[in-house]
Protein backbone atom coordinates (compact mmCIF):
# COMPACT_ATOMS: atom_id res chain seq x y z
CA UNK A 1 0.00 0.00 0.00
CA UNK A 2 1.42 3.38 -1.01
CA UNK A 3 1.34 6.45 1.21
CA UNK A 4 -1.59 8.12 -0.58
CA UNK A 5 -3.80 5.05 -0.23
CA UNK A 6 -2.82 4.71 3.43
CA UNK A 7 -3.65 8.34 4.21
CA UNK A 8 -7.04 7.98 2.50
CA UNK A 9 -8.12 5.13 4.77
CA UNK A 10 -11.05 5.80 7.14
CA UNK A 11 -10.20 6.90 10.67
CA UNK A 12 -12.50 7.25 13.70
CA UNK A 13 -13.18 10.69 15.07
CA UNK A 14 -12.96 11.38 18.77
CA UNK A 15 -16.45 10.84 20.19
CA UNK A 16 -16.10 12.45 23.64
CA UNK A 17 -14.67 15.86 22.76
CA UNK A 18 -15.16 17.49 26.14
CA UNK A 19 -13.38 14.68 27.95
CA UNK A 20 -10.38 15.11 25.64
CA UNK A 21 -10.42 18.89 26.04
CA UNK A 22 -10.46 18.72 29.84
CA UNK A 23 -7.81 15.98 30.09
CA UNK A 24 -5.35 17.70 27.73
CA UNK A 25 -5.81 21.04 29.50
CA UNK A 26 -5.18 19.47 32.89
CA UNK A 27 -2.15 17.61 31.54
CA UNK A 28 -0.58 20.80 30.17
CA UNK A 29 -1.10 22.66 33.46
CA UNK A 30 0.14 19.80 35.66
CA UNK A 31 3.12 19.06 33.41
CA UNK A 32 4.33 22.66 33.63
CA UNK A 33 3.67 22.91 37.38
CA UNK A 34 5.49 19.66 38.18
CA UNK A 35 8.42 19.69 35.72
CA UNK A 36 8.73 23.44 34.98
CA UNK A 37 10.66 23.07 31.68
CA UNK A 38 11.99 25.84 29.38
CA UNK A 39 13.68 27.63 32.32
CA UNK A 40 10.34 28.23 34.03
CA UNK A 41 11.99 26.94 37.21
CA UNK A 42 14.12 30.10 37.26
CA UNK A 43 11.05 32.27 37.72
CA UNK A 44 10.55 33.03 41.43
CA UNK A 45 7.31 35.03 41.46
CA UNK A 46 4.88 34.49 44.31
CA UNK A 47 1.97 33.84 41.92
CA UNK A 48 3.91 31.24 39.96
CA UNK A 49 1.36 28.45 40.50
CA UNK A 50 -1.47 30.65 39.25
CA UNK A 51 0.54 31.71 36.18
CA UNK A 52 1.41 28.13 35.26
CA UNK A 53 -2.22 27.09 35.69
CA UNK A 54 -3.03 29.76 33.12
CA UNK A 55 -1.39 27.60 30.43
CA UNK A 56 -4.05 24.97 31.09
CA UNK A 57 -6.78 27.60 30.72
CA UNK A 58 -5.29 28.86 27.45
CA UNK A 59 -5.11 25.28 26.20
CA UNK A 60 -8.74 24.71 27.20
CA UNK A 61 -9.96 27.80 25.33
CA UNK A 62 -7.88 26.87 22.28
CA UNK A 63 -9.25 23.31 22.18
CA UNK A 64 -12.83 24.56 22.51
CA UNK A 65 -12.19 26.81 19.50
CA UNK A 66 -10.59 23.99 17.49
CA UNK A 67 -12.78 21.03 18.40
CA UNK A 68 -16.17 22.64 19.00
CA UNK A 69 -16.48 26.00 17.23
CA UNK A 70 -14.48 25.23 14.06
CA UNK A 71 -16.01 21.75 13.70
CA UNK A 72 -19.51 23.23 13.94
CA UNK A 73 -18.68 25.83 11.30
CA UNK A 74 -17.11 23.34 8.86
CA UNK A 75 -19.43 20.39 9.49
CA UNK A 76 -19.00 18.91 6.03
CA UNK A 77 -15.20 18.68 6.32
CA UNK A 78 -15.42 17.16 9.81
CA UNK A 79 -18.18 14.67 8.95
CA UNK A 80 -17.23 11.39 10.61
CA UNK A 81 -18.39 9.35 7.62
CA UNK A 82 -15.73 11.01 5.44
CA UNK A 83 -13.00 11.23 8.07
CA UNK A 84 -9.62 9.97 6.81
CA UNK A 85 -6.14 9.46 8.26
CA UNK A 86 -4.81 12.55 6.43
CA UNK A 87 -7.59 14.66 7.94
CA UNK A 88 -6.68 13.37 11.39
CA UNK A 89 -3.03 14.35 10.83
CA UNK A 90 -3.95 17.85 9.64
CA UNK A 91 -6.45 18.32 12.45
CA UNK A 92 -3.99 17.30 15.18
CA UNK A 93 -1.13 19.36 13.72
CA UNK A 94 -3.49 22.36 13.61
CA UNK A 95 -4.47 21.73 17.24
CA UNK A 96 -0.80 21.60 18.28
CA UNK A 97 -0.05 24.75 16.29
CA UNK A 98 -2.92 26.73 17.83
CA UNK A 99 -2.10 25.51 21.35
CA UNK A 100 1.52 26.54 20.80
CA UNK A 101 0.46 29.92 19.43
CA UNK A 102 -1.94 30.55 22.29
CA UNK A 103 0.61 29.62 24.93
CA UNK A 104 3.30 31.66 23.16
CA UNK A 105 1.07 34.73 23.30
CA UNK A 106 0.31 33.99 26.94
CA UNK A 107 4.04 33.62 27.68
CA UNK A 108 4.84 36.90 25.92
CA UNK A 109 2.27 38.69 28.08
CA UNK A 110 3.09 37.07 31.42
CA UNK A 111 6.89 36.83 31.06
CA UNK A 112 7.55 39.93 28.94
CA UNK A 113 10.15 41.00 31.50
CA UNK A 114 11.97 37.66 31.28
CA UNK A 115 11.86 36.50 27.65
CA UNK A 116 13.03 38.51 24.69
CA UNK A 117 9.74 38.48 22.81
CA UNK A 118 9.74 38.87 19.04
CA UNK A 119 9.22 37.00 15.80
CA UNK A 120 12.10 34.63 16.52
CA UNK A 121 10.54 33.83 19.92
CA UNK A 122 7.24 32.79 18.34
CA UNK A 123 8.98 30.75 15.61
CA UNK A 124 11.14 28.94 18.16
CA UNK A 125 8.14 28.35 20.44
CA UNK A 126 6.08 26.89 17.60
CA UNK A 127 8.95 24.80 16.28
CA UNK A 128 9.51 23.17 19.67
CA UNK A 129 5.76 22.56 20.09
CA UNK A 130 5.38 20.94 16.67
CA UNK A 131 8.53 18.81 16.91
CA UNK A 132 7.64 17.56 20.38
CA UNK A 133 4.06 16.77 19.34
CA UNK A 134 4.61 15.31 15.86
CA UNK A 135 6.32 12.06 16.88
CA UNK A 136 3.73 10.93 19.46
CA UNK A 137 0.90 11.97 17.11
CA UNK A 138 2.30 9.82 14.30
CA UNK A 139 2.80 6.83 16.60
CA UNK A 140 -0.68 7.26 18.11
CA UNK A 141 -2.47 7.47 14.76
CA UNK A 142 -0.65 4.49 13.20
CA UNK A 143 -1.10 2.31 16.30
CA UNK A 144 -4.76 3.22 16.77
CA UNK A 145 -5.61 2.70 13.09
CA UNK A 146 -3.97 -0.73 12.96
CA UNK A 147 -5.58 -1.88 16.20
CA UNK A 148 -9.10 -0.75 15.26
CA UNK A 149 -8.82 -2.03 11.69
CA UNK A 150 -7.86 -5.51 12.91
CA UNK A 151 -10.59 -5.43 15.56
CA UNK A 152 -13.42 -4.47 13.20
CA UNK A 153 -12.32 -6.76 10.40
CA UNK A 154 -12.70 -9.57 12.92
CA UNK A 155 -16.13 -8.21 13.92
CA UNK A 156 -17.16 -8.06 10.25
CA UNK A 157 -16.06 -11.67 9.82
CA UNK A 158 -18.21 -12.64 12.81
CA UNK A 159 -21.23 -10.92 11.24
CA UNK A 160 -20.60 -12.60 7.88
CA UNK A 161 -20.27 -16.03 9.50
CA UNK A 162 -23.53 -15.44 11.33
CA UNK A 163 -25.27 -14.49 8.07
CA UNK A 164 -24.06 -17.71 6.45
CA UNK A 165 -25.51 -19.90 9.18
CA UNK A 166 -28.92 -21.39 8.57
CA UNK A 167 -31.37 -20.08 11.12
CA UNK A 168 -34.88 -21.08 11.98
CA UNK A 169 -36.66 -17.93 13.05
CA UNK A 170 -40.26 -16.98 13.58
CA UNK A 171 -40.55 -13.72 11.69
CA UNK A 172 -43.52 -11.45 12.28
CA UNK A 173 -44.35 -8.93 9.61
CA UNK A 174 -45.72 -5.99 11.55
CA UNK A 175 -47.52 -2.91 10.33
CA UNK A 176 -45.80 0.34 11.28
CA UNK A 177 -47.43 3.76 11.27
CA UNK A 178 -44.77 6.42 11.64
CA UNK A 179 -45.72 10.00 12.53
CA UNK A 180 -43.55 13.07 12.02
CA UNK A 181 -42.97 15.64 14.77
CA UNK A 182 -46.12 17.56 13.85
CA UNK A 183 -48.20 14.41 14.50
CA UNK A 184 -50.00 15.04 11.19
CA UNK A 185 -47.64 13.78 8.50
CA UNK A 186 -47.29 10.02 8.62
CA UNK A 187 -46.36 6.97 6.58
CA UNK A 188 -47.48 3.35 6.87
CA UNK A 189 -45.37 0.35 5.94
CA UNK A 190 -44.49 -3.19 6.99
CA UNK A 191 -41.34 -3.56 9.06
CA UNK A 192 -39.90 -5.99 6.48
CA UNK A 193 -40.06 -3.24 3.84
CA UNK A 194 -37.77 -0.96 5.85
CA UNK A 195 -34.11 -0.88 4.85
CA UNK A 196 -32.66 1.90 6.98
CA UNK A 197 -33.29 5.36 8.37
CA UNK A 198 -30.76 8.17 8.17
CA UNK A 199 -30.76 11.32 10.28
CA UNK A 200 -30.01 14.60 8.52
CA UNK A 201 -30.15 17.63 10.79
CA UNK A 202 -33.71 17.97 12.12
CA UNK A 203 -35.04 15.50 9.56
CA UNK A 204 -34.86 11.78 8.93
CA UNK A 205 -34.86 9.95 5.62
CA UNK A 206 -36.68 6.61 5.58
CA UNK A 207 -35.58 4.11 2.92
CA UNK A 208 -38.35 1.64 2.05
CA UNK A 209 -39.14 -1.04 -0.50
CA UNK A 210 -42.09 0.02 -2.62
CA UNK A 211 -43.13 -1.91 -5.75
CA UNK A 212 -39.71 -3.57 -6.02
CA UNK A 213 -37.90 -0.21 -5.76
CA UNK A 214 -36.23 1.45 -2.80
CA UNK A 215 -37.78 4.84 -2.20
CA UNK A 216 -36.84 7.62 0.21
CA UNK A 217 -39.29 9.55 2.36
CA UNK A 218 -38.27 12.60 4.41
CA UNK A 219 -39.92 13.68 7.65
CA UNK A 220 -39.12 16.11 10.41
CA UNK A 221 -38.13 13.97 13.39
CA UNK A 222 -35.21 13.06 15.63
CA UNK A 223 -33.61 9.66 15.13
CA UNK A 224 -34.18 8.71 18.77
CA UNK A 225 -37.89 9.46 18.42
CA UNK A 226 -38.04 7.39 15.22
CA UNK A 227 -36.51 4.42 17.04
CA UNK A 228 -39.44 4.41 19.48
CA UNK A 229 -41.75 3.22 16.68
CA UNK A 230 -39.77 -0.04 16.47
CA UNK A 231 -39.82 -1.13 20.12
CA UNK A 232 -41.43 -4.46 19.20
CA UNK A 233 -39.19 -5.18 16.21
CA UNK A 234 -35.81 -6.36 17.59
CA UNK A 235 -34.36 -6.78 14.10
CA UNK A 236 -34.50 -3.00 13.60
CA UNK A 237 -31.71 -1.39 15.64
CA UNK A 238 -29.69 1.77 15.84
CA UNK A 239 -26.23 1.19 14.38
CA UNK A 240 -24.82 4.72 14.30
CA UNK A 241 -25.70 8.06 15.83
CA UNK A 242 -27.24 8.92 12.44
CA UNK A 243 -28.56 5.52 11.28
CA UNK A 244 -31.13 2.85 12.09
CA UNK A 245 -30.92 -0.39 10.10
CA UNK A 246 -33.09 -3.45 9.51
CA UNK A 247 -30.64 -6.25 10.27
CA UNK A 248 -32.75 -8.70 8.24
CA UNK A 249 -31.64 -6.83 5.13
CA UNK A 250 -27.90 -7.26 5.79
CA UNK A 251 -26.14 -9.50 3.27
CA UNK A 252 -22.52 -8.77 4.23
CA UNK A 253 -20.28 -6.60 6.38
CA UNK A 254 -16.77 -5.25 6.07
CA UNK A 255 -14.64 -3.62 8.72
CA UNK A 256 -12.50 -0.52 8.86
CA UNK A 257 -11.02 1.51 11.71
CA UNK A 258 -14.29 3.45 12.13
CA UNK A 259 -16.39 0.33 12.66
CA UNK A 260 -18.38 -1.63 10.08
CA UNK A 261 -19.96 -0.97 6.70
CA UNK A 262 -23.10 -2.98 5.92
CA UNK A 263 -24.25 -4.05 2.47
CA UNK A 264 -28.02 -4.52 2.20
CA UNK A 265 -30.15 -6.55 -0.19
CA UNK A 266 -30.56 -4.84 -3.58
CA UNK A 267 -29.29 -1.56 -2.13
CA UNK A 268 -26.34 0.46 -3.43
CA UNK A 269 -25.93 2.46 -0.21
CA UNK A 270 -23.64 1.10 2.51
CA UNK A 271 -24.83 1.70 6.07
CA UNK A 272 -22.14 2.57 8.63
CA UNK A 273 -21.91 0.98 12.05
CA UNK A 274 -19.99 3.08 14.57
CA UNK A 275 -17.82 1.56 17.27
CA UNK A 276 -20.40 1.86 20.04
CA UNK A 277 -22.94 -0.20 18.08
CA UNK A 278 -20.77 -2.97 16.61
CA UNK A 279 -21.64 -5.51 19.31
CA UNK A 280 -25.36 -4.72 19.04
CA UNK A 281 -25.38 -5.35 15.27
CA UNK A 282 -23.17 -8.42 15.57
CA UNK A 283 -25.41 -9.98 18.25
CA UNK A 284 -28.60 -9.23 16.33
CA UNK A 285 -27.67 -11.71 13.58
Image (cartoon, rainbow, N blue to C red):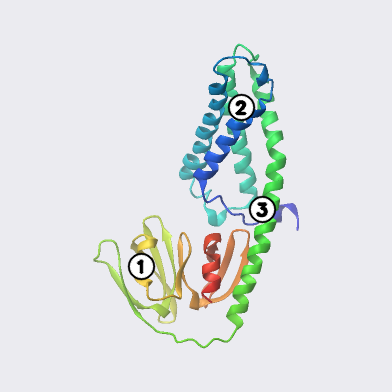
Task: Write down the residue under mark 1.
Answer: 228
Q: Is residue 53 above or below residue 94?
A: above
Residue projecting furthest to the right: 2
Marks 3/1: CA distance? 35 Å
Which element carries disc 2, helix, strand or loop? helix
Looking at the rendered structure, the number of numbered marks drawn on it comes to 3
Tell me which label, 3 or 2, sits earlier in the chain. Answer: 2
Viewer-closest of 160 and 24: 24
Residue projecting furthest to the top: 113
> Which residue is found at the position 40% from the left and 84% from the top?
172
> Which residue is found at the position 74% from the left and 52% from the top?
3
Which element carries disc 3, helix, strand or loop? helix
Q: Are marks 1 and 2 in contact (CB under 8 Å)?
A: no
Q: Is residue 31 left or right of residue 1?
A: left
* Rendered location of residue 127, percent (x, y): 69, 29
Task: Write down the residue under mark 2.
Answer: 33
Residue 201 visible? The answer is yes
Q: Are marks 3 and 2 in contact (CB under 8 Å)?
A: no
Q: Is residue 136 above or below residue 145?
A: above
Q: Which mark is residue 144?
A: 3
Instruction: Indicate which label's residue lies in the foreground, 3 or 2.
Output: 2
Q: Is residue 112 left or right of residue 188?
A: right
Instruction: Indicate which label's residue lies in the foreground, 1 or 2.
Output: 2
Amino acid sequence: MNLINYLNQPFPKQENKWKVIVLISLFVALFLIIFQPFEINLFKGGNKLLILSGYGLVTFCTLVFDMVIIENIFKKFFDERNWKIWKEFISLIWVIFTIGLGNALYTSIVFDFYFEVGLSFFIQFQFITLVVGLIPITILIITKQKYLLRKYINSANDVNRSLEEEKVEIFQNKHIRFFADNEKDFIEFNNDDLYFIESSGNYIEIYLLNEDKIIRKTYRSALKRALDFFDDTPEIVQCHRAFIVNTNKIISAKGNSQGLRLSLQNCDIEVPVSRNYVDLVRNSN
